[in-house]
Amino acid sequence: MHEFSIATRLLELVEEQARRAGARRVASVKVVVGKLSGVVPELLREAFEFCSKGTLAEGAELVIEEPPLRCKCRACGAEYEPEAFSLKCPNCGAADFEITSGRELLLESLEVEA
């Protein structure tokens, strides 16, 4: 379960930023987890809670934003959210696309108490 290593690294980043801000506690952490990131949000939430014990983020709320999978057709330029089993463009039927959203895994923001 790689969510534990991700949570550990996330907490390192959070603590680093909180210390820079002179915070005594982290109240909330917002992360963006795309559907194709390979991260299971609920497992990340559990790992974050477990790994945050004894840190500035202990008890912090973990807010997980899950952006939809979005593609852009290289043939016609249409932007779309693909259907469950087909990534083809619904506008022209082409299968030549780029993924524009859905692979993200990033620390969006944190709220601290000074």
Image (tube, rainbow, N blue to C red):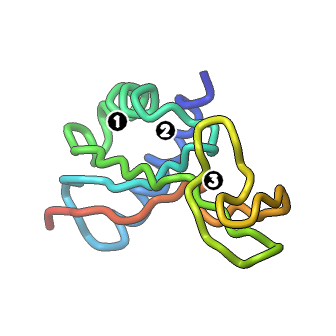
| Amino acid type at image mark 2 | Ala
Cα distance, mark 1 to mark 3? 25 Å
Q: Quadrant of residue 111?
A: bottom left
Task: Tell me which numbered mark, 1 or 2, is placed earlier along the sequence.
Answer: 2
- Residue 52 circle label: 1
Tell me: residue 79, above or below residue 103. Answer: below
Determine the residue positioned at 56% across, 36% down.
39
Cα distance, mark 2 to mark 3? 17 Å
Determine crowd level at label 3: few under 14, some 14-19, many 20+ residues with C-alpha closer than 10 A.
Answer: many
**Residue picked out by circle 3:** 103
Residue that extends furthest to the left in the rendered view of this protein:
113
- Residue 7 circle label: 2
Q: Nearer the viewer, residue 85 or 55?
A: 85
Residue 97: where, in percent of width, then height?
78, 63
Tell me: residue 9, above or below residue 78. Answer: above
Query: What element does badge 1 sit on?
Result: loop
Residue 45: where, in percent of width, then height?
37, 33
